[in-house]
Amino acid sequence: MKNSITKPSKNPRKILKKSENPTLLEKGRQGESVAAVYLQRHGYTIKERNYRISKYEVDILAEKDNTLVFCEVKMRSNIKNGSPEYNVGADKLHKLTRAAMLYLNYFPYAGAVRLDVLAVNPYKDGFEVKHYKDVLY
């Protein structure tokens, strides 16, 4: 099911500055921060980060144009280990879907809802972000 993510949205590259020698946990947070900045620069409002509900987590919950977006963020320290988006398989998408359903049970939303994946790759002195929208379709 890893092939459920096929193409990024238009203009996926957004370069942001890297910090030097982050730890593994810091790398994860850094990837999420890069993705959050990318979303904000593209007109999204960040509603939550690292939102936990039951045993599930949503990396970023954002909103734009009356659409609530549940985001999974994947980052690789270098592209030699493969593209991060290919590590979002059926199990991860199921968990993200379940988290979205639980969230919406507690906080009903009148607009559209979608699930996105943001892949963060190192690129020269910054990062490249690929934004895959509506990954379940």
Image (cartoon, rainbow, N blue to C red):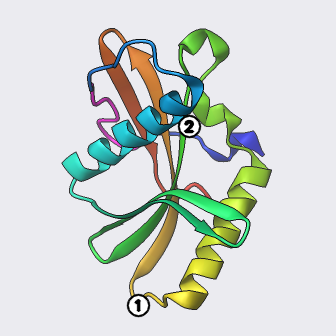
The main secondary structure of the magenta stretch is: loop
Whole-percent x and y of residue 117? 52, 48
* In the rendered image, the vertical position of residue 127 relative to residue 63, given as above or below: above
- In what element is the residue under mark 2? strand
**Residue 126 image-quadrant placement:** top left
> Crowding near pointer 1: few (<14 within 10 Å), some, many (20+)?
few
Seen in the image, is 109 located left or right of residue 39?
Answer: right
Q: Is residue 97 magenta?
A: no
Seen in the image, is 120 located left or right of residue 56?
Answer: left
Residue designated by label 1: 110
Residue designated by label 2: 74
Which of the two discs, 1 and 2, sits closer to the camera?
2
Q: Which residues are magenta?
A: 9-15
Whole-percent x and y of residue 55? 73, 66
Amino acid type assigned to the residue bearing label 2 in the image: Lys
For image coordinates 64% across by 80% down, the residue present is: 102
On the rendered image, what quadrant is the C terminus found in? bottom right
Disc sitting over residue 64 in the figure: none
Whole-percent x and y of residue 61? 44, 63
For image coordinates 53% across by 22% down, the residue present is: 23
Mark 1 vs 2, N-terminal side: 2
Q: Is residue 10 magenta?
A: yes
For image coordinates 59% across by 30% down, the residue present is: 84
Kindly report the distance in space between the C-alpha atoms of the residues bearing marks 1 and 2: 28 Å
- In what element is the residue under mark 1? loop
Q: Are marks 1 and 2 in contact (CB under 8 Å)?
A: no
Seen in the image, is 25 located left or right of residue 112?
Answer: right
Nearer-the-camera pick, 57 or 110: 57
Amino acid type assigned to the residue bearing label 1 in the image: Ala
